[in-house]
Image (cartoon, coloured by chain):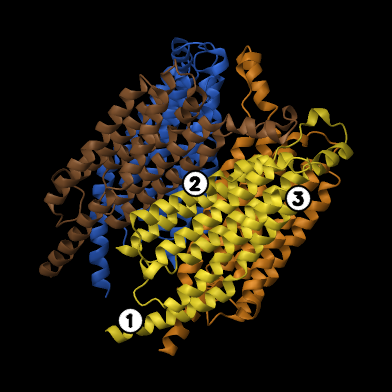
Chain colours: A brown, B blue, C orange, D yellow
Amino acid sequence: MDEKETGRLEAFSDGVFAVAITLLVLNIKVPEPDKLLSDANLWKALFTQWPTLAAFVTSFFTIGIMWLNHHRVFTLIKRTDTSLIMINLVLLLIIVFIPVPTELLAEYLLRFDLHTAAIIYAGTFLLMASAFNILWRYASYQGRLLGKHVNMHLVRSINRQFAFGPLLYLICFGLAWFNTPVSLFFGLALALFFAVPGSSLRLLMKREEITDRENNKNDR
Amino acid sequence: MDEKETGRLEAFSDGVFAVAITLLVLNIKVPEPDKLLSDANLWKALFTQWPTLAAFVTSFFTIGIMWLNHHRVFTLIKRTDTSLIMINLVLLLIIVFIPVPTELLAEYLLRFDLHTAAIIYAGTFLLMASAFNILWRYASYQGRLLGKHVNMHLVRSINRQFAFGPLLYLICFGLAWFNTPVSLFFGLALALFFAVPGSSLRLLMKREEITDRENNKNDR
Amino acid sequence: MDEKETGRLEAFSDGVFAVAITLLVLNIKVPEPDKLLSDANLWKALFTQWPTLAAFVTSFFTIGIMWLNHHRVFTLIKRTDTSLIMINLVLLLIIVFIPVPTELLAEYLLRFDLHTAAIIYAGTFLLMASAFNILWRYASYQGRLLGKHVNMHLVRSINRQFAFGPLLYLICFGLAWFNTPVSLFFGLALALFFAVPGSSLRLLMKREEITDRENNKNDR
Amino acid sequence: MDEKETGRLEAFSDGVFAVAITLLVLNIKVPEPDKLLSDANLWKALFTQWPTLAAFVTSFFTIGIMWLNHHRVFTLIKRTDTSLIMINLVLLLIIVFIPVPTELLAEYLLRFDLHTAAIIYAGTFLLMASAFNILWRYASYQGRLLGKHVNMHLVRSINRQFAFGPLLYLICFGLAWFNTPVSLFFGLALALFFAVPGSSLRLLMKREEITDRENNKNDR
């Protein structure tokens, strides 16, 4: 029963992640052919779109790796309650909103004197990282919604790892007030960075799995 | 066999919910950079979009919590028939339609003398709440599509709880004729309110689960 | 192994159905507030959109009930092969295309002298019904991709029922050459009609299920 | 545990494939009724859209059959790791991007002197085929992420088959520099071609399945 509940929450979240990540492409506008008379002009028109592409790629990996970590965390979370569902909804609200600051950033990336777009962009990522942190901390506090025999050592080590998330996005947010391209590049680097620690996290999760299984045996 | 049927109905519904909730973001338009020459102007342009954001957030939570209750109800509904599928399709039709009144409301939220947009917005929610009620009542009438050993006490208590849905949205609809922002705020409050009763509902569902399991044991 | 294959084919198809049915809403345009100075004008502007709504509702139920029948047929189809997947892709191509004729029809519904839009709309439905028929006939021919102990009596009775699909859509297509609104109304009636026969179809399917289960017992 | 992980990766990928394939339809624009006064004009306006339709159909089958091969490969891949998830994200990034070159190609298909659009279109497919190849080779290298008793003979035969993918798309890419329509037609032919070899591939996979099952028996 519990598993089935998490199952449908994950399925719904997966759906929202998948749609949001795909909708990002709607921001990329194709230059109209009437104004371009040659291949050279088309190449030029396309190259001027590189800020759109840079914002698209950064947001794509940010959402994609947010999904990945969401997925990882839900291998440990076994039960749900109303609060978890609400925190998850807030996280999804931020994910769904990402195409808006992405478009904004793309339009203002080359206006080096203006930083509003970058601030909103990095601010959205900061909110996302915070919501994800709250989700994990709520679920893992005293093992509330985790498996029965969860290793609290593991939980604390994940807590330490995850605490970096909002912190690093806070730096990204700070950078946005001074330099838009650097902040964007830092955001992309963060997305890729959060994909990697998984290897150690998963090692821990696998160890946890084994302990869990052994405990289950002992229970019988 | 029965479960698999409900399974694919739920999967399809989840998909529609996920796409509809994500499409809401398409209503949010980014101000064009050509007309704005400074950060101050961009902030101003963004702040004038707060009605769009308010409508977006309200619709997001309304659809999200409608999904949540849809999901809850389908932990009790075990079988499907053509009528249930049709009622569910009507419910999904209303869900899919929500981005339209959302955009309408956003455009007219600050025209305090005009109420058409708010009436259509609240009216759509009223229809949604009614369709959901009909779905539950159809499925639960004499335990038609529920599990075999369902506790009719529980069904009646859910019935009482769910009867508030259309009633409260009727008030929201009534408010729309007089004051658009109050009606929108009331709609958001309703969405959050319908997330909460779940805790008691789920307690009941869990008790039901146990009874169900015990009955199954006795059958064998 | 076989089941898992059908499982993912169904999941992908469900996803496409869910997105296509939700994208229909993008056809509905909200009247711009600048041109409307009163509630009366807004109501009027909205009422002139009824052809868009009529086309939206018809296409919504057509896709929704196509999904329903797709789902029903795949409770009988147990295996897949390349041809089935290709026929299914062609069916999905037509489903995905539906928003285009829907928008076209909405724009031309009230031009009683012009029938091109209605012809394309009804023609798309005719193609859809034909592709679905081919899918079923390919899968069921000599029980090719069905369960092992499938009742060929049942298959033939479904064949007879399904033969009406393209035939009735052919009538709808014929009507489109003369009268657009009548053709649209007939299309909506067809969608609802194809939801109903399910009850008898499912009775047959259930009987089949039981036979299947008994045969399985005998095999052991 | 491992299977569940692949399960959610596949579900997320299926979602992205389903949304991307459906978003292709947004490229098809409906001619505005105000400029057309007769059925003959509408037919003419629609016929001038055949490049859009040709690009739509080609991209639809390319994504659809990419999904099919993704699905086939994941019947052999049983485990995931961070690298596989990242390669898969890159593949999805390319899939999600496809509507952009599709729209570009549609607009430039009849400008026989301009080849930029076709080069970008075929180049995107070349990247897609390469990413898919890398995904498979990474997963299958020394049986890294495959089932325990996987037949390395089979893996090598798939390797040989898959090596054609990037090669053939390289030819398609080369053609794009000289003749846009030929390149598009070749791209469609490739999509259909990659659907077919599946029959032999699946024969191999089935044989593999049986070996796998027998090995499992011997283990016990």
- Looking at the picture, does residue C2 appear above or below residue C14? below
* Mark toward the start of the polypeptide (2 vs 3): 2
- The residue at the point 49 percent across, 22 percent down is A108
Q: Amino acid at mark 3?
A: Pro
Q: Nearer the viewer, residue A52 or C186?
A: A52
Residue D22 position within the rendered picture, expressed as x and y whole percent measured from the top left:
59, 47
Q: CA distance from mark 3 to mark 1?
A: 51 Å
- Looking at the picture, does residue A193 appear above or below residue D131? above
Q: CA distance from mark 2 to mark 3?
A: 26 Å
* Mark toward the start of the polypeptide (3 vs 1): 3
- In the picture of the structure, the residue carrying the numbered disc 1 is D216
- In the picture of the structure, the residue carrying the numbered disc 3 is D181
- The residue at the point 61 percent across, 26 percent down is C30
Q: Does residue B218 appear in this view?
A: yes
| Pointer 1 with pointer 2, Cβ within 8 A | no
Of discs 1 and 2, which sits in the foreground?
2
- Left or right of A137 on screen, residue A29: right
SS assignment at label 1: helix
Indicate the quadrant containing the C terminus of chain C: top left, top right, bottom left or bottom right.
bottom left
Q: Which mark is residue D93?
A: 2
